[in-house]
Image: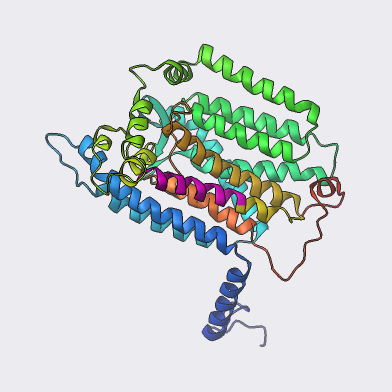
């Protein structure tokens, strides 16, 4: 009768008393706190705090522009929603940072595959906004390309790390074809800005993976050729480039953003005292950096640029001693995505780059975009976790790439 089922006995042999579970949970938190990059986490939280203040400054302007004679929006509606999304994003990011590298890899591949599938149906069932069809309504507007970015970096890192198993595998050709497929799907939306960002992530990762230097010129030439074809046959790209080079009336928000940015001088006009922001489209999203310039001044703008640069450098420095090729490539790919999006947005506001419709990560208002950025940073924090008591055995990038044993 020892093998008979006993309803008084726990159904699972792994049942643990509550006190034991609490102790294990406390131990896991101690391990997490010991291994997490606290500097990187602190920079992220600081930028999120700046984002709350920036959306507070921009919310009245956007609410006023979107109000109608029948409906008057609460001037702090966007701020209230932003705080909710920030809390959700912070919880998501911290939760993901508890994952192991293998778990982060599997999750990144799964999310990337799902978002790639959704990218195929966006032109069919997607919502159209401002002439672009990029969003799917799932209770809130979900932009699949935002979540595909971290998935793309993880998938490319995983494939490129196969080089350690078999150097004859055409991993560069595989990720290049993957990049081409995504670019084609994005151009159909149209979404030239994200296509360029995906191209930048791809280029950094294949160069880091050890592509021959002789091929670099071909890669650069191919990218320039693709941009030229986009200019000739893609109206959206041609209009934006023409506006950037010579001005125009259809896409002159970049000029307005630049004037707003410089209106506050070095120290700014003060919170809620900005005037030009009231006529600035997308003040709470694409052009929030200009609102910061008007109300808080160019000195604060410079400080924000320094924070983004510090985040990128911190993540890269963290990866310099890495002895796992997948972790190295994934970490660099994720930080390239984050930093690339931030600096493209800033350059657009400075009138140094054509308008791309990209938000400023961790600062701009957004639902799915905020969650996607926090998803990216959660994976980055998980991949950059390191036991401080274990010394790295890596002997440099060249030795790492030329090693023959399988990657973990």
Q: Quadrant of residue 5?
A: bottom right
Q: Residue at x 56, y 37 (%)?
A: 116
Q: In this view, which residue lies farthest toward the top? A: 232
Q: Residue at x 72, y 71 (%)?
A: 389
Is 57 on the left-hand or right-hand side of 287?
left
Q: How many marks?
A: 0
Q: Where in the figure is residue 303, as x and y percent of width and height?
A: 46, 49
Q: Where in the figure is residue 13, as x and y percent of width and height?
A: 63, 79
Q: Where in the figure is residue 121, as x and y percent of width and height?
A: 48, 31
Q: Is residue 212 visible?
A: yes
Q: Where in the figure is residue 214, as x and y percent of width and height?
A: 80, 26
Q: Front-most of 159 and 346? A: 346
Q: Residue at x 46, y 58 (%)?
A: 45
Image quarter where the C terminus lies is bottom right
In this picture, is 342 found above or below 319?
Answer: above
Colour treatment of the image: rainbow
Is 335 on the left-hand or right-hand side of 145?
right
In this picture, is 64 found above or below 395?
Answer: above
In this picture, is 232 found above or below 300?
Answer: above
Q: Front-most of 234 and 264? A: 264
Image quarter where the N terminus lies is bottom right
Q: Is residue 368 visible?
A: no
- Which residues, given as a range, are shown in magenta? 297-313
Q: Front-most of 351 and 88? A: 351
Q: Main secondary structure of the magenta part?
A: helix
Q: Front-most of 22 and 279? A: 279
Q: Quadrant of residue 323?
A: bottom right
Q: Is residue 284 magenta?
A: no
């Amino acid at each position: 009768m020892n093998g008979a089922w006993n309803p008084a006995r726990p159904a699972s042999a792994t049942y643990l008393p509550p006190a034991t579970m609490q102790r294990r949970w406390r131990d896991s938190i101690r391990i997490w706190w010991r291994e997490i990059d606290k500097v990187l986490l602190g920079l992220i939280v600081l930028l999120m705090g700046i984002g709350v203040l920036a959306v507070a400054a921009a919310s009245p302007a956007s609410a006023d522009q979107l109000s109608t004679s029948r409906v008057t929006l609460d001037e702090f509606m966007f701020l209230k929603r932003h705080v909710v999304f920030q809390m959700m994003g912070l919880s998501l990011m911290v939760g993901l940072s508890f994952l192991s590298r293998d778990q982060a890899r599997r999750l990144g591949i799964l999310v990337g595959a799902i978002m790639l599938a959704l990218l195929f149906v966006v032109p069919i069932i997607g919502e159209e906004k401002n002439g672009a069809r990029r969003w799917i309504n799932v209770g809130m507007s979900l932009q699949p390309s935002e979540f595909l970015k971290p998935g793309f970096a993880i998938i490319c890192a995983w494939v490129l790390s196969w080089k350690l198993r078999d150097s004859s595998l055409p991993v560069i050709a595989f990720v290049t074809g993957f990049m081409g497929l995504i670019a084609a799907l994005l151009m159909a939306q149209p979404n030239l800005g994200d296509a360029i960002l995906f191209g930048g992530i791809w280029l950094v990762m294949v160069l880091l993976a050890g592509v021959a230097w002789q091929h670099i010129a071909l890669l650069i030439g191919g990218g320039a050729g693709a941009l030229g074809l986009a200019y000739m046959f893609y109206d959206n790209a041609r209009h934006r480039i023409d506006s950037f080079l010579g001005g125009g009336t259809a896409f002159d928000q970049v000029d307005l953003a630049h004037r707003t940015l410089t209106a506050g001088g070095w120290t700014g006009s003060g919170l809620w005292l900005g005037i030009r922001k009231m006529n600035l489209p997308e003040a709470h999203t694409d052009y929030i950096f200009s609102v910061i310039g008007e109300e808080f001044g160019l000195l604060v703008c410079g400080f924000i640029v320094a924070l983004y640069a510090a985040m990128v450098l911190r993540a890269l420095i963290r990866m310099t001693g890495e002895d796992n090729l997948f972790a190295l490539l994934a970490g660099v790919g994720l930080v390239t995505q984050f930093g690339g999006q931030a600096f493209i947005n800033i350059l657009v506001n400075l009138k140094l780059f054509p308008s791309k419709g990209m938000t400023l990560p961790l600062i701009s208002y957004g639902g799915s975009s905020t969650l996607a950025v926090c998803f990216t940073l959660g994976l980055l924090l998980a991949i950059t976790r390191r036991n401080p008591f274990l010394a790295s055995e890596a002997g440099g990038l060249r030795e790492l790439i030329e090693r023959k044993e399988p990657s973990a």
